């Protein structure tokens, strides 16, 4: 109908991989400039708030409970191998430290069995990592698809859920992931949390909850440049769309916003809560 004003990249449940593969081979990855076929997604564990993220150690507030493993690892490995062989990108949800390690181990096996290529594996959330896990992301160029604003939900409760020491050692290790060579891609996880990217950039830079004087795990704060890249070119890279999106370059789609700040220094010192205008495909879409 010609009415779309937002680009979408779709991921489908992993069991449907044969249908997704057939569709991509028949139609290509881009059905139009607006609709792109990304790949397949699975869930290995749950969430911290529901005590279902999968950890090595039990929850402090639920003794004896380590969280949930939602998929058998052999089943997940076989489905990932087949999806990867067919050329599909694979994204898997993992929040707890054990879930993330199990995925990193599995991805090692996939690379060993299927060979090296530009596959851009994604771990969705990667919220709590064991010591050394951040550097493992870089070994195969794995994408840490993270959501800074989830930090606003977890910073106040993580200490109660898994203990202060564990929480501060393992949670939202954005800077460590970058240092380890991971591709860090920001998103919102909307509608679970707020969709506003400017707010997410502010959160990644400050790691402060409203009313807090000190940041949560200050060593993991990101500078402005890394935060902007994570929400633009790196997010596009995470969808195999960096050739058309994510930066203002001749030949790419002219999707951009006009900010109210007069300089990047002013922007960094006081990140605004709004934009003056939004352009999609070179046409003004807002206001």
Image (spheres, rainbow, N blue to C red):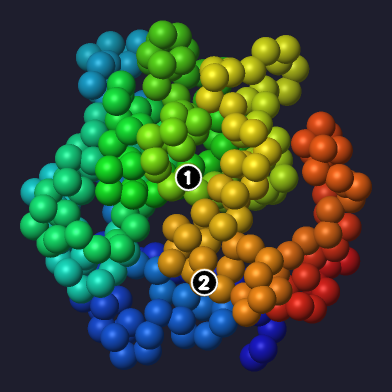
Q: Is residue 264 left or right of residue 47?
A: right
Is residue 122 found left or right of 256 in the rendered image? Answer: left
Q: Quadrant of the N terminus?
A: bottom right
List the residue tagged with mark 1.
Answer: 184
Residue 164 location, quadrant: top left
Tell me the quarter of the picture where residue 258 sits: bottom right
* Residue 197 visible in the displayed image: yes
Residue 243 numbered mark, or none? 2
271 or 225: nearer the viewer: 225
Label 2 or label 1, whichever lies nearer to me, is: 2
- Please report the residue visible at 79 percent of the width from the left and 65 percent of the height from the top: 278
Q: Is residue 254 above or below residue 180?
A: below
Q: Along the polypeptide, which appears first: circle 2 or circle 1?
A: 1
Classify residue 284 as left or right of residue 177. right
Estimate the spatial distance between the alpha carbons at disc 2 and disc 1, rounded to whole Å.
17 Å
- Residue 230 spot, x, y in % from top left: 56, 48
Badge 1 local density, few (<14 within 10 Å), some, or many (20+)? many
Question: Which quadrant: the C terminus?
Answer: bottom right
Where residue 149 sits: x, y (%)? 60, 37
């Amino acid at each position: 109908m010609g009415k779309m004003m937002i680009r979408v990249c779709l991921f489908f449940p992993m069991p449907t991989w044969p249908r997704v593969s057939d569709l991509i081979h028949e139609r290509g990855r881009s059905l139009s400039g607006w609709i792109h076929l990304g790949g397949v997604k699975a869930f290995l564990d749950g969430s911290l708030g529901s005590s279902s993220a999968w950890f090595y150690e039990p929850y402090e507030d639920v003794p004896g409970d380590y969280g949930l493993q939602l998929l058998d690892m052999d089943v997940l490995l076989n489905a990932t191998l087949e999806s990867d062989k067919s050329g599909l990108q694979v994204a898997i949800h993992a929040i707890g430290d054990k879930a993330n390690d199990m995925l990193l181990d599995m991805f090692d096996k996939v690379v060993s069995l299927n060979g090296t290529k530009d596959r851009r594996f994604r771990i969705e959330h990667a919220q709590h990592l064991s010591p050394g896990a951040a550097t493992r992301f870089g070994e195969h160029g794995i994408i840490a698809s993270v959501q800074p604003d989830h930090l606003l939900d977890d910073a106040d409760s993580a200490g109660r859920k898994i203990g202060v020491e564990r929480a501060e050692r393992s949670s939202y290790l954005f800077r460590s992931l970058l240092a380890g060579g991971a591709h860090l891609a920001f998103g919102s996880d909307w509608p679970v949390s707020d969709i506003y990217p400017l707010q997410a950039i502010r959160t990644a830079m400050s790691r402060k909850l409203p009313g807090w004087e000190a940041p949560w795990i200050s060593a993991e704060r990101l500078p402005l440049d890394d935060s902007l890249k994570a929400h633009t070119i790196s997010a596009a890279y995470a969808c195999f769309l960096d050739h058309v999106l994510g930066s203002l370059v001749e030949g790419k789609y002219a999707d951009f916003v006009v900010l109210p700040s007069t300089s990047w220094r002013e922007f960094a010192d006081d990140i605004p809560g709004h934009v003056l205008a939004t352009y999609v495909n070179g046409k003004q879409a807002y206001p």
